[in-house]
Image: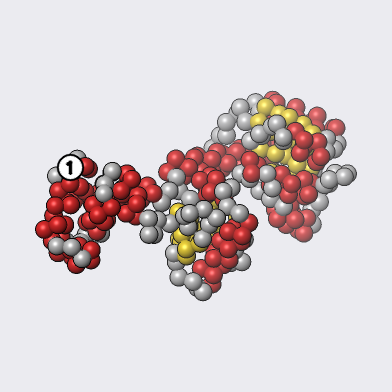
């Protein structure tokens, strides 16, 4: 598996010899490189730089590699950028700290260039696959996220992140609690959450996503707004949108007349107008258009 050679690698190390040694090798391998002599300098560079991968020394004066990595991962644009630690620390606790800080791998110093090159290729390829998957989710408009049993959110699809940017902290806190309640079985989905705007959200649990994470779907709720959506989409009257909604739910004219407390003949007259306005000739086609519109309204 060969990663793209045009990838940009940010090398962060306070030792000039290491920067020169590793940096020269990266250039020979065909990677673009940028270097920083400290964690603070790396964070400044990242204001204007979007690397594909970061090589990060664990032990540096001032801001060490672990704190630097945490600061990097707090940036939304850096969430999926792989960080490989370079460390002379061999104790398992230091390795765990690096991975907990957001690193994906580590290499021991003195650095084996062949091992480093292999790790870079693997993690760049994985990152590229992740970006492709996220792009596909974004094009589909899927609002997916993962959370652990406590409700701590670990991953979001791009559409979910944009939705979160619109929410206040109270709604986000309620959403995290709803995630925890769903995992614990205290709530049965979907859970409806109020938002500062006119529309609410629905949270549904999907399936496990990794060892300690659960995958959720977040959608805008259209409960109570279905007829308005249909009325606006197809320029229907209020009663015509009522009829179309129940048609989309598989109800017969007799059922609809009882639900809306109007005669079956009146239902049929409304339905004739619905067919004309939707440009269809039968109930099945009308129901399909209505269902498609209601699904679009949830995104």
Q: Is residue 102 visible?
A: yes
Indicate left or right for 266 with 33 as reference: left
Question: For the view shown, which residue lies furthest in the right direction?
Answer: 61
Looking at the picture, does residue 181 appear above or below residue 144?
A: below
Q: Farthest residue to the left: give it.
A: 265
Write down the quadrant of residue 54 in the picture.
Answer: top right
Rendered location of residue 250, percent (x, y): 21, 59
Q: Indicate the quadrant where residue 175 lies.
A: bottom right
Q: Residue at x 13, y 55 (%)?
A: 268
Q: Residue at x 35, y 49 (%)?
A: 229
Q: Image check: 284 left or right of 53?
A: left
Closer to the camera in the image, 72 or 223: 223
Q: Mark 1 — residue? A: 276
Q: Position of residue 5 (x, y in %)?
A: 60, 28
Query: In this orientation, which residue lies closer to the viewer: 67 or 74?
Result: 74
Q: Residue at 58%, 63% (x, y): give it.
A: 174
Q: Please state the total of marks drawn on the protein image.
A: 1
- What kind of element bears circle 1? helix
Q: Quadrant of the N terminus?
A: top right
Residue 234 falls in image quadrant: top left
Lateral position of residue 55 relative to residue 234, left or right: right
Residue 86 visible in the shown view: no
């Amino acid at each position: 598996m060969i990663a793209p050679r045009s990838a940009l690698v940010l090398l962060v190390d306070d030792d000039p010899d290491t920067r020169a040694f590793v940096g020269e090798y990266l250039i020979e391998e065909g990677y673009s490189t940028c270097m920083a002599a400290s964690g603070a300098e790396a964070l400044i560079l990242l204001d204007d730089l979007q690397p594909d991968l970061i090589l990060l020394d664990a032990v540096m004066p001032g801001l060490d590699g672990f704190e630097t990595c945490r600061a990097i991962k707090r940036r939304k644009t850096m969430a999926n950028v792989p960080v490989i630690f370079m460390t002379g620390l061999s104790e398992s606790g230091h390795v765990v700290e690096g991975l907990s800080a957001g690193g994906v791998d580590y290499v021991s110093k003195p650095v084996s260039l062949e091992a480093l090159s292999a790790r870079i290729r693997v993690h760049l390829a994985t990152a590229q696959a992740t970006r492709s998957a996220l792009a596909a989710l974004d094009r589909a408009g899927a609002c997916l996220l993962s959370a652990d049993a406590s409700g701590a959110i670990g991953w979001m699809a791009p559409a979910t992140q944009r939705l979160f940017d619109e929410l206040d902290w109270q709604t986000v806190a309620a959403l995290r609690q709803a995630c925890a309640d769903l995992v614990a079985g205290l709530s049965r989905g979907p859970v409806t959450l109020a938002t500062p705007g006119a529309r609410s959200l629905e949270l549904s649990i999907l399936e496990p996503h990794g060892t300690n994470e659960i995958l959720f779907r977040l959608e805008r709720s259209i409960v109570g707004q279905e007829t308005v959506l249909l009325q606006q989409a197809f320029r229907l009257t209020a009663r015509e949108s009522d009829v179309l909604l129940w048609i989309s739910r598989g109800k017969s004219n007799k059922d609809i007349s009882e639900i809306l407390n109007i005669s079956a003949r009146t239902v049929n007259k409304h339905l004739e107008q619905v067919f004309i306005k939707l440009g269809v000739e039968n109930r099945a086609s009308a129901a399909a258009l209505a269902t498609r519109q209601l699904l679009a309204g949830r995104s």
